[in-house]
Image (cartoon, rainbow, N blue to C red):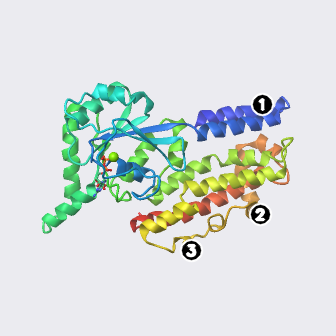
C-alpha cells in the first residue's frame, strides 16, 4: 500500500472514533483495501507477428501454452484489434496483445491511435531478432506520449542452442549474450533519447527463470507509480524465489489493515464473530490463489512438469486441506499463544485501532494468523519454479 493511502487511513482511524464513529473507521479501512486491490494496471505487448508476444504474455501470467486460459501461440495473427488477457487470479491486471508492427508503410502514430495508447500504463516492445526501424519509430512515438517502454529481445534460449550446435568448439555463452545485447542496443542508442544500455532485456519465455526475465519484473516494480505496485506484485509469476519473495512482501504490507478489518467484524454492530473467520478464510484463500497453489493451478503445474508428487511436498495446513471455517478457527485458537510476538509490531503501527479491536479475537491474533498463513504458503510456492523449470533459481 502506498504511503499516501496509509496516511489517509491512519488519519481516518484516529479521527473517526473521536466522533464516536468506530464503524465508519472500519468502513474506511475496507474501502481503501478494496481500492488498492482493484487498481487497474494495463500493460501493452507489441512487436512483429511471430516474435513471441503471446508466449511472453503466458509466461507473465504464469501459464503454459496448454493451460485453459492461455493465449494461443504459434498461430498467424488474424486480428488487428488489441486482445486483452486478464491475469487469471488478479483481474485488475491486464496484458494486451497488440497487433503486429511488421506491416509495410507502418505509421507509429496511426498504430498507437488505433490501439488506444492512452489505455496502457506502459509498453513492452518485443523482437526475436534485431530491433528494426518500426520498433524505433514506435518507441519514439511512445516517448512523445510520455509513456514508458521496455525493449525485450525474446527467444534467447534458441540463440544459445543454435550457436552451441553450430560452433560447439568456440561457443561462449557470456560472449554471445553480450554480443546480442550490443547488437540490440546499438541501433536504439543512436535513435532514442536517454536510453540506457540496461533497458534491453534478453529473455526466454520458455525459461523465464533464466537471463533477464527477473530483472525485467523488478524494473517494472521499481518504475511503476506506487499506487499500482501492489496489484502488479500480487500478479507476479512464480518464476524464482526472488519473485515469490517480492509477492510475499507486497501481501505482508497490508496485513495489519486486513487483520484490523477482520477483527472488527466482532465489534461492528450487526456482525458476528463468524464474520471474522470468514474474512480471514477469504484472505488466506486469496494467498493460495495468488501463489498458484489452488487445486486447479497445482494440477496444471503437475501436468506441465510431468511430476505427480507436488501436492505431497506441500507443508502449510492451508494448502494441504480445504480452507474451511473449522480449519481457520482451529488454527486461530492454536496460534493464540504466539500472538504476543506480533502484537508488539502490530500495536506500534496502529495503537488506536488495536486498542479498539481487543475482543476475543484481537486484531493482533488475526494479524498473527495471516502472517503465519502467508509465510507457509509462500514457502510451499517455492516448489513451483523448481517443478516448472527444473531448478529453484
Ligand atoms: N525457443 C523459443 N521459442 C519461442 C519463445 N517464445 C515464443 N517462441 C515460439 O515462437 C513462435 C511464435 O510465438 P508467439 O508467441 O505465437 O508469437 P506472436 O505471434 O508474437 O504472438 C511459437 O512457435 C513459439 O513457441 C521463446 O522464448 N523461445
Ligand atoms: Mg500472438
Q: Nearer the viewer, residue 348 or 336?
A: 336
- Residue 131, compared with residue 67, is above or below; it is above
Quarter of the picture holding the C terminus:
bottom left
Which residue position holds label 2? 326
Q: Position of residue 318 (x, y in %)?
A: 65, 64
The answer to which quarter of the image holds residue 288 is bottom right
Seen at 30% across and 25% down, the residue is 110
Q: Is mark 2 within 8 Å of ligand 1?
A: no
Residue 256: image tag: none
Q: Count residues near mark 3 (Cα–Cα under 10 Å), then give few for <14, some for 14-19, many for 20+.
A: few
* C-alpha span from label 2 to label 3: 22 Å
Can residue 28 be seen at all in this image of the molecule? yes
Q: Nearer the viewer, mark 2 or mark 1?
A: 2
Question: Is 111 left or right of 350, judged from the image as shown?
Answer: left
Q: Position of residue 266 (x, y in %)?
A: 83, 48
Seen at 46% across and 54% down, the residue is 237
- Residue 140, compared with residue 266, is above or below; it is above
* C-alpha span from label 2 to label 1: 36 Å
The answer to which quarter of the image holds residue 349 is top right
Question: Is 30 left or right of 153, judged from the image as shown?
Answer: right
Q: Nearer the viewer, residue 82 or 320?
A: 82
Can residue 344 be seen at all in this image of the molecule? no
Residue 312: image tag: 3
Label 3 residue SS: helix
Q: Nearer the viewer, residue 75 or 54?
A: 75
Q: Count residues near mark 1 (Cα–Cα under 10 Å), then give few for <14, some for 14-19, many for 20+.
A: some
Which numbered disc flags the more N-terminal residue, 3 or 1? 1
Which numbered disc flags the more N-terminal residue, 2 or 3? 3
Residue 15: image tag: 1
Q: Position of residue 154 (x, y in %)?
A: 29, 50
- Residue 349, compared with residue 298, is above or below; it is above
Contact between labelled residues 1 and 3, with CB atoms less than 8 Å apart:
no
Amino acid at each position: 500500500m502506498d504511503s499516501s493511502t496509509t496516511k489517509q487511513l491512519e488519519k481516518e482511524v484516529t479521527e473517526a472514533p473521536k466522533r464516536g464513529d468506530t464503524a465508519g473507521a472500519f468502513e474506511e479501512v475496507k474501502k481503501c483495501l478494496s481500492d488498492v486491490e482493484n487498481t487497474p494496471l494495463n500493460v501493452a505487448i507489441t512487436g512483429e507477428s511471430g516474435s513471441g508476444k503471446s508466449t511472453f504474455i503466458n509466461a507473465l501470467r504464469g501459464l503454459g501454452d496448454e493451460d485453459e486460459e492461455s493465449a494461443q501461440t504459434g498461430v498467424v495473427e488474424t486480428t488487428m484489434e488489441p486482445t486483452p488477457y486478464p491475469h487469471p487470479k488478479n483481474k485488475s491486471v491486464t496484458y494486451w496483445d497488440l497487433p503486429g508492427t511488421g506491416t509495410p508503410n507502418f505509421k507509429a502514430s496511426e498504430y498507437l491511435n488505433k490501439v488506444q495508447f492512452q489505455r496502457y500504463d506502459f509498453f513492452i516492445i518485443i523482437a526475436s531478432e534485431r530491433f528494426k526501424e518500426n520498433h524505433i519509430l514506435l518507441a519514439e512515438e511512445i516517448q512523445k506520449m510520455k509513456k514508458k517502454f521496455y525493449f525485450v529481445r525474446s527467444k534467447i534460449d534458441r540463440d544459445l542452442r543454435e550457436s552451441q550446435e553450430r560452433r560447439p568448439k568456440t561457443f561462449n555463452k557470456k560472449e554471445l549474450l553480450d554480443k546480442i545485447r550490443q547488437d540490440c542496443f546499438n541501433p536504439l542508442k543512436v535513435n532514442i533519447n536517454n536510453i540506457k544500455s540496461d533497458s534491453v532485456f534478453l529473455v526466454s519465455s520458455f525459461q523465464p527463470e533464466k537471463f533477464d526475465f527477473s530483472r525485467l519484473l523488478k524494473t517494472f516494480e521499481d518504475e511503476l507509480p506506487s499506487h499500482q505496485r501492489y496489484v502488479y506484485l500480487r500478479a507476479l509469476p512464480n518464476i524464482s524465489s526472488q519473485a515469490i519473495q517480492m509477492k510475499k512482501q507486497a501481501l505482508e504490507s497490508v496485513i495489519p489493515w486486513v487483520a484490523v478489518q477482520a477483527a472488527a467484524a466482532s465489534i461492528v454492530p450487526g456482525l458476528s464473530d463468524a464474520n471474522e473467520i470468514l474474512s480471514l478464510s477469504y484472505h488466506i484463500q486469496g494467498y493460495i490463489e495468488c501463489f498458484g497453489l489452488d487445486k486447479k493451478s497445482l494440477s496444471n503445474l503437475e501436468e506441465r512438469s510431468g511430476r505427480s508428487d507436488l501436492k505431497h511436498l506441500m507443508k502449510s495446513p492451508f494448502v494441504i486441506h480445504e480452507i474451511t471455517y473449522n480449519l481457520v478457527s482451529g488454527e486461530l485458537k492454536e496460534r493464540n499463544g504466539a500472538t504476543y510476538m506480533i502484537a508488539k509490531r502490530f500495536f506500534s503501527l496502529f495503537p488506536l485501532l488495536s486498542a479498539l479491536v481487543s475482543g476475543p479475537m484481537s486484531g493482533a491474533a488475526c494479524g498473527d494468523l495471516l502472517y503465519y498463513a502467508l509465510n507457509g504458503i509462500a514457502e510451499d510456492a517455492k516448489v513451483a519454479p523448481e517443478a516448472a523449470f527444473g531448478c529453484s533459481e
